[in-house]
Image (cartoon, helix red, strand yellow):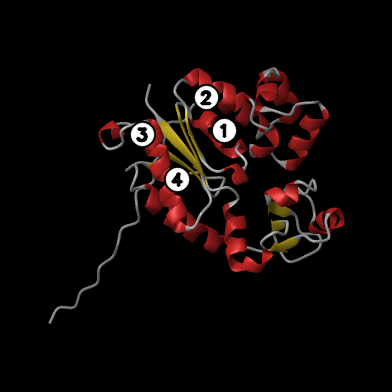
């Protein structure tokens, strides 16, 4: 079975904001949609999450949970530039790199045919991780067998614990993926909170729900995520080619 890697540069906009404000080290930090007390939070640091400050709540509400919260706006063009920089670096480890369309900082790499360049899956994942560290980004790298399984594990690994993992079998990957906390897997805040009230806390809990009933009650994107995680829906890797470099010349 072909290998692939999922790379998660966790909360990429948050990492960019922390670079801009190095004096915020040690504080809970969040990225907001705009500079307004009613602006929703888009990303929240691990330290902020300890205060139940989660993406989707209002900035004013977040401040009521922790008065030391630091927050700021990160422009879309800043995020896009960072995604291009990271994708270019990842192409040193695989020619086929797919940036996540909906979540900046998530990437998939095709591992097919790389056995002659890297002595093992672990060596490949460590090389990827080191390459991103050299760029100054915290990252999690998971090498496995399925798109959603590797994604779920990458998103669930807490940033402070470091970074990388290579599964030896599909069964190992599935076991780890099913333990992934559901609040890390991109559900809208309303659906995330409704499922939490039902006691659905992990991906395994989520997959135990009947797909038909889930679709009737929650619609998209919960139903789509259920299909992807269960294998009912499958999308092949869709690599994005590097941008062409333009070279200007002057004829004399």
Q: Which of marks 4 and 1 is nearer the N terminus?
A: 4
What residue lies at 87% left-to-right and 56% top-to-bottom? 64
Which residue occupies the extreme left position in the image? Answer: 252
The residue singled out by tag 4 in the image is 129
Tag on residue 111? 3
- Res 173 label: 2
Mark-to-mark CA distance, 1 and 3: 18 Å
User: Which numbered disc, 3 or 2, marks the residue that appears first in the sequence?
Assistant: 3
What residue occupies the far right of the structure in this picture? 64
Image spot of residue 112 (x, y percent): 32, 31
Label 3: how many Cα within 10 Å (few below 14, some 14–19, many 20+):
many
Q: Distance between the residues labelled 4 and 3?
A: 15 Å
Give me the residue at 37% from left, 37% from top.
123
Q: Distance between the residues labelled 2 and 1?
A: 8 Å
Q: In this view, does 16 lie above or below 150?
A: below
Image marks 4 and 1: residues in contact by CB distance under 8 Å: no
């Amino acid at each position: 079975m072909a290998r692939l890697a999922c790379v998660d540069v966790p909360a990429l906009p948050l990492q960019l904001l922390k670079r801009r404000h190095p004096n915020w080290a040690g504080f809970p930090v969040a990225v907001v949609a705009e500079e307004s007390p009613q602006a929703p939070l888009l990303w929240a640091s691990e330290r902020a999450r300890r205060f139940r400050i989660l993406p989707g709540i209002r900035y004013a509400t977040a401040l009521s949970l922790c008065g030391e919260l630091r927050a700021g706006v990160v422009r879309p063009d800043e995020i896009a530039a960072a995604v291009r920089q990271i994708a270019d670096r990842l192409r040193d480890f695989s020619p086929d790199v797919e940036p996540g369309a909906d979540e900046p900082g998530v990437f998939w790499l095709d591992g097919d045919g790389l056995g002659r360049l890297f002595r093992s899956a672990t060596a490949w994942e460590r090389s990827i991780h080191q390459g991103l560290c050299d760029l100054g980004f915290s990252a999690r790298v998971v090498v496995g067998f399925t798109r959603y399984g590797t994604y779920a594990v990458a998103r669930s690994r807490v940033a402070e614990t470091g970074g990388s993992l290579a599964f030896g079998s599909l069964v190992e990957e599935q076991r780890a993926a099913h333990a992934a906390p559901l609040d890390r897997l991109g559900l809208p805040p309303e659906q995330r909170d409704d499922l939490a009230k039902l006691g659905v806390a992990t991906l395994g809990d989520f997959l135990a729900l009947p797909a038909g009933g889930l679709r009737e009650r929650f619609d998209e994107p919960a139903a789509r995520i259920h299909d992807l995680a269960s294998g009912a829906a499958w999308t092949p890797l869709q690599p994005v080619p590097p941008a062409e470099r333009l070279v200007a010349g002057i004829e004399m």
